Image (cartoon, rainbow, N blue to C red):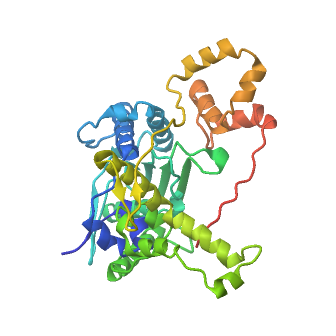
Amino acid sequence: MKPRIRCSELDRILACPGSLTLNARVDPREGDEGLMGTAVHYIAHSRIKAELGAVGDLGPEPDLSKAKLSEWIANFYVREVQESIPPDWSLECEAALEWEFENFILTGHPDDIGMSPDTTEACGLDLKAGYIPVDIAEENWQMSAYGVLLRLNYPELLKLRYKIVQPRNDEDDGHPRVSEFYLEPTVDNPDPIGRLVAILEQKINDAIKRDRELETGRVQCRWCSAALQCAAAIKLRDEMKHTLTDEDIADVKRRADDVTLAGWVIAAKTLSRPIEDAMDLAKERIAEVGSIVSAEGETLTVKTSAGSYEVVDPAGYMAAFRTILPGEDDLVACFKPSQTKVKDRISEKMNVPKSGKAAVTSTTIFDGHLRIFVKQNERQTIVIS
């Protein structure tokens, strides 16, 4: 039987083919963030259908209380869809796409797809409602796979634009809230989408042939439901236990060498998600049974203490704040505005696009009036390739 592969799991499978085997044997990991994302998607798509005339089956209504404080994410996304899809194009939410290749079946449910009347151009958008920044569109195989499915189902398709919209990203920290890739015919590459189809099929075929080979890494371990039971990840974790030898002591330098530094960075990125999941699952298990015991006989329990604050009524909070700290210097000392959110507010209040080719956007207004008062620092990101 041919394996059914979802576009949403491709970034994991292509980086770690063995995860294709392991994930079929474990329960999917679904936390509060996933439930919130489902609710936010439903709110956004309900608006897109009602206000923009989109078609599509949204399925049963989820628990919308999970999105109580996150409805702004849906509003951000709806505006991006409205600005990206020309009014004379067709628009579909949650499209069910599928294609049977020689060795596998590729399936996907793109969030929103706009198609030109002659089906030669398409624009897709994918909403990411989470806190962890995903790879940008041009490095994201999920988006490429959606484009592949569109081309196979619409052979006339020549031009493709695909956007990832992640409103929780803060551009002040160097993470774009909207990223995109664009493919169109050129002299050197007359059919870039057809070329992408061939490349992706080859990559998936190669992964299927190596479906017992595990390879830990930042992307694949972060999104893998089997990471906690993965032999490669456990081996990497256990390698952190060691008895010092004379050679080890002799090798220690006053400053770590380049190889050592690089190894720690890679290990940190690889193990971060399994460790986070293990912490969450352990807390859930301890809440059920009181305690759990490690292989070494150590007992794990949970101690509850005060956590961080969350402002649930910003207007009420600000009014109360002003009664006890009324001075402007108090406000400046206690609050750090996000310039990304300032641009959002300009766009909302002045009814202008956030960015793009329009004569007036929230970005141009920000640049003309506020940029002189701020400094945008550089953000250095370590890229592992």
- Residue 59: % across, % down: 24, 42
Q: Quadrant of the C terminus?
A: bottom right
Taking the image as shown, residue 218 lies to the left or right of residue 377, namely: left
- Report the front residue among 210 and 164: 210
Q: Is 131 on the left or on the right of 102, as rendered?
A: right
**The N terminus lies in quadrant:** bottom left
What's the residue at 36%, 53% (across, down)? 281
Image check: 278 left or right of 378? left
Vertical order, 285 against 366 (above or below): below
Q: Is residue 349 above or below residue 178?
A: above
Residue at coordinates 68% horizontally, 82% vertically from top-left?
A: 249
165 displayed left or right of 371: left
Farthest residue in the top direction?
Answer: 323
Q: In which quadrant of the rendered view does residue 12 lie?
A: bottom left
Depth check: give the residue in front, 32 or 338: 32
Quarter of the figure with residue 381? bottom right
Q: Is residue 148 visible?
A: no
The vertical placement of 326 against 311, above or below, is above
Residue 204, image quadrant? bottom left
